[in-house]
Amino acid sequence: MNSDTLQGKWKQIKGQAKRKWGELTDDELDQIDGKRDELVGKIQEHYGIAKDEAEEQVNQFESSCHC
């Protein structure tokens, strides 16, 4: 899945993102609206991890996403 697909299908996969990153609020997920960079940033912020780790988590999420 590429960034365009992530953004285009965000409404459908938002619940999967919520399950994976439970600390993200519904409002934050709405604001992210499928924007990969914003998702990475929020993951970094909430989980206190480096950008590379957050990027890797998003890559894995994109690879395993059922949409």
Image (cartoon, helix red, strand yellow):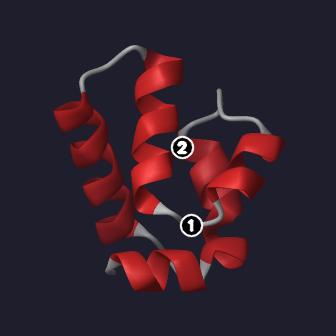
Residue holding disc 2? 20
Q: Residues within 10 Å of mark 1 (few under 14, many from 20)?
A: many
- Relative image position of residue 52 (x, y in whole percent): 17, 36
Q: Looking at the rendering, which quadrant does residue 65 occupy? A: bottom left
Residue holding disc 1? 34
User: Cβ–Cβ below 8 Å for labels 1 and 2?
Assistant: no
What's the distance in space between the residues labelled 1 and 2, CA to CA? 15 Å
Q: Earlier in the sequence, mark 1 or mark 2?
A: 2
In the rendered image, which quarter contains the C terminus? Answer: bottom right
Dot 1: what SS? Answer: loop
Residue at image position (24%, 23%) is 50
Q: Residues within 10 Å of mark 2 (few under 14, many from 20)?
A: few
Residue at image position (48%, 75%) is 6
Quick one: which residue is furthest to the top in this view? 48
Q: Amino acid at mark 1?
A: Gly
Q: On screen, 9 above or below 35?
A: below
Residue at image position (54%, 43%) is 20
Looking at the image, residue 53 sits to the left or right of residue 16; the answer is: left
Dot 2: what SS? Answer: helix
Looking at the image, residue 19 sits to the left or right of residue 27; the answer is: left
Looking at the image, residue 13 sits to the left or right of residue 56; the answer is: right
- Relative image position of residue 58 (x, y in whole percent): 35, 52
Q: Amino acid at mark 2?
A: Lys
Q: On screen, 26 above or below 61?
A: above
Q: On screen, 44 above or below 31?
A: above
